[in-house]
Amino acid sequence: MAKIAVHMTGGIAVYKAVEVVRGLQKQGHEVRVAMTKNAARFVGPATLAALIKHPVLIDQWSATLNGQVPHIELADWSDLALVVPATANILAKMANGLADDAVSATLLATSAPKMAVPAMNVHMWNNPATQRNIAQLKRDGVIIMEPADGMLAEGYAGKGRMPEPAEIVKQVQNCLTKQPLQSSAANGQLKGKTIVVTAGGTREALDPVRYLGNRSSGKMGIAIAQAAAASGAKVELIVGSVSVELPQSPNIAITTALSTQAMADAVSQKFAHADALIMAAAVADFRPAVLADQKIKKHGDGTLTLHLVPTEDILATMGAQKKPGQAVIGFAAETNDLLQNANAKLAKKHADVIVANDVSKPGIGFGSDANAVTILRPNQAPLKWPRQSKQKIAAKIVDLANQLLKAGD
């Protein structure tokens, strides 16, 4: 779950932004809203305040909140700043660092990633000044969601329509996956370190068509890789089957390893020269004893008996082989007896940390954008992290890795 500041500006499409807020809340995110005074002409702030259960920021000169200046408090609070709709005016202010109202001041003050959803008349969109501002914002790292083509409020067609709320919510989810949230280690404390991260699920082939697999999306491992890169580390990301886009970063080298054996080989090679290993991949415990060279056909009564054999236990192997100064963090995805099974794994695998999560609970685990985990370490009490975004958990795991490496120096 991320903290998202939604900044609404004075375009006719602002009424759709209310549905964006509702969509983000349905995804489990915490939302606050800042509006320009012109936006408040289209949508009543009381409606939004009732929806988000929090006051809407409109006046940057309003009284302090809990001893803090409101626009600074909102800027510091947010994990992501979403500008929807983004008028030509606010784009110009953002591109040139202006801060003459609550929205522009908050956007200038925040260090959170920014995403803007432009919506305006086609001629305003095509104006060279607007296009210069868009280009500058992209150079500044602002994510721009292009407006759609279609019928405009003026009664003619053109580019400038705000995308549908569901599409905006989907793009926000993608943005949160690609943009790691800040960790306390994100000040370069891992600079000079090499971190190996595994992500996704492995596939064990039955025949040329079918395989044994699992529901891992790769979101957790990818978020960890991004958080480690943000902290200054060189990251070796080893991915199995994933359902999300892979990160593009000069600090992240990606190796694809779809089978357990391929992943074991890649991890062994990379970890030999690395400082830490974070095994977030969902690795198969079994594989077919025999790989059929042709597609398996139905015979007789149509039943099929598979003979399965254990795969290599990558975490146990690396835990046993780790050298002084190296750190190993593993995951335990369980559906029952979480702490009992995870503690057994901690002892058996020789890991420094086990991150345990119950994947049977709705809204966390495989495929979700949030997780709730328990951190297990030898001779220490369990540490519970409540439900939050995988980006936040990733940042905390990277902090743990940093602590382990410092202790081993």
Image (cartoon, helix red, strand yellow):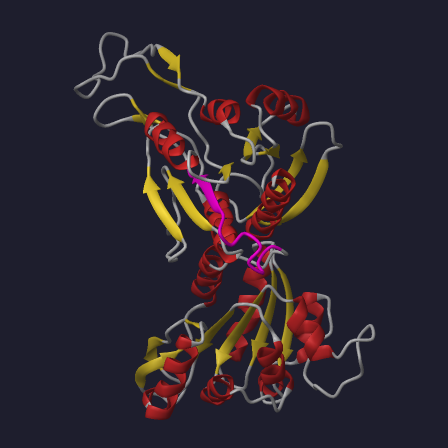
Judging depth in this view, the residue of 39 and 176 nearest the camera is 176
Residue 373: quarter of image: top right
- Residue at the (48%, 58%) spot, across then down: 173
As drawn, 120 above or below 30: below
Residue 100: quarter of image: bottom right
* Left or right: 290 as drawn, with respect to 28: left
- Residue at the (51%, 47%) spot, across then down: 224
Residue 290: quarter of image: top left
Number of disc labels: 0
Judging depth in this view, the residue of 304 and 387 nearest the camera is 387
- Residue at the (59%, 23%) spot, across then down: 345
* Left or right: 37 as drawn, with respect to 251: right
- Residue at the (39%, 30%) spot, across then down: 268
Magenta segment includes 74: no
Q: Is residue 359 visible?
A: yes
- Residue lying furthest left: 294
Figure quadrant of the C terminus: top right
Magenta segment includes 187: yes
As drawn, 57 above or below 124: above
Residue 407 rendering spot, x and y as whole percentages: 65, 40
* Left or right: 406 as drawn, with respect to 238: right
Residue 203 rendering spot, x and y as whole percentages: 34, 29
